[in-house]
Amino acid sequence: YFKRKRVEVLHVQHVFVFQRCYWPARLAGVKNIVLTEHSDYAFRTMPEYKETSRKYAPLADTVTAIHKRLQQYLVEELSVPVGKMRVIYNSVDTERFSPGLPHSNLRGQLGLDEACVLLGWVGRMHDAKDLANLVNAYEIISATASSSHALVLIGDGDDRAMAETLVRNKGLSEQVFFLGERPDIPDLMRNFSFYISSSKNEGVPLVILEAMSTGLACVTTEVGGIAEVVKPGTGLLVPPKDPQALASAAVKLIDDRIFRAQTGAQARSYVTRNYRFVDMIDAYQEVLNIA
C-alpha cells in the first residue's frame, strides 16, 4: 500500500499503531515517520506494552508529545532521544468556541431559573473521566453552595448508566441533567457558567481548551498535562479522586460571580494567545516537512 501510494511522510498516533506499520513503511521507502503520543496511561498500566514501546518509539524520525510532562516520560522511560522530541500542544478553534449569547436557552429548556449557576461537563463517559468522583463532589456542592446551581453532563459511554444510578441514589435527579450526545457543543458551552472536570487520567483534553476559549473558568483535577494549560488566574486545580477538594473549588466559583467572570475572561485571553489552531498546524507542518 505504501509503495502503491508513493508515501513519503507518515504521521502515526500512538506507539501501538506505530509498531505495526513501522517496518512496512521503511521497506516501502517512506522517508519521514512522525509519532505522536497523547498520554502515558497505557505505558504506566501495561508493563508489556511499555517494553514493546521502548523498542519502537526511538525508531521514529520525530516524536511529538502534547505536553511537557509526557515529553519527559517518553525520554526517561521509553528512551526516546531528546533530539527527536517536540512538544506540540493541542489547539482550539477560538472563533468557533468563543464567548457570547447562546442561541439556545438551556436553562429554560431544563426548567431552571435564569440565575441558576450552570456547571458543565462534556466528554465520553468512561472510567478515566471518573464520573463517580464528579457526582460525589456535586452531592457536597449541593449541601454547601449558597447560590442556586445545576450540573449538566453532555456525552455518552459505558459509565453513563452508573452515573445516572448514582445520581438517583443520592437524590440529585432534579439538579443533575444528562443530555446525551449533542452536535451543538459550542452553543451549549455558552450556556455554562463554568466548566468542571473530575478525570483521573488525561493528556491535555480538548474540551478544557474549548471551555477556556468560550470564556469559562475551569475547575479540574490536576492530571496529565492539564496544569500546563490551566494556570493560576484561568481556573482552579485540585487533586484527582478527591470529591471534597473538587466541591470546595466549585463552590468558590458558584458563590463568587465576579471571581468567576474574571477567571473566565483570563482563561479566554490565555488560550487565544497560546493555543491557536494555526500555530499547531504550523508546528506539525514543520516536523512533517510539508511546505
Image: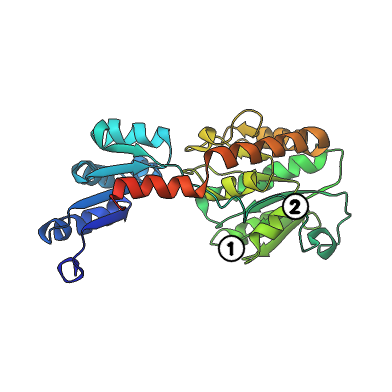
85 vs 120, nearest the viewer: 85
- The residue that label 2 is drawn on is 100
Residue 14 relative to residue 150: left or right: left
Picture residue at 69% right of the left edge, 44% below the top: 215
From the top left corner, tell me how far across and down residue 257 is, in percent.
Answer: 82, 37
Relative to 75, residue 117 above or below:
below
Which of the 4 image quadrants contains residue 85? Answer: top left
Question: Mark 2–mark 1 contact, CB under 8 Å?
Answer: no
225 vs 245, nearest the viewer: 225
Which labelled disc corresponds to residue 156?
A: 1
Quarter the N terminus occupies: bottom left
Of marks 2 and 1, which one's residue comes earlier in the chain? 2
276 vs 177, nearest the viewer: 276
Residue 241 relative to residue 72: left or right: right
Which labelled disc corresponds to residue 287?
A: none
Instruction: Name the element at disc 2.
Output: loop
Residue type indicated by callout 1:
Asp
From the top left corner, tell me how far across and down residue 42 is, in percent.
Answer: 36, 46
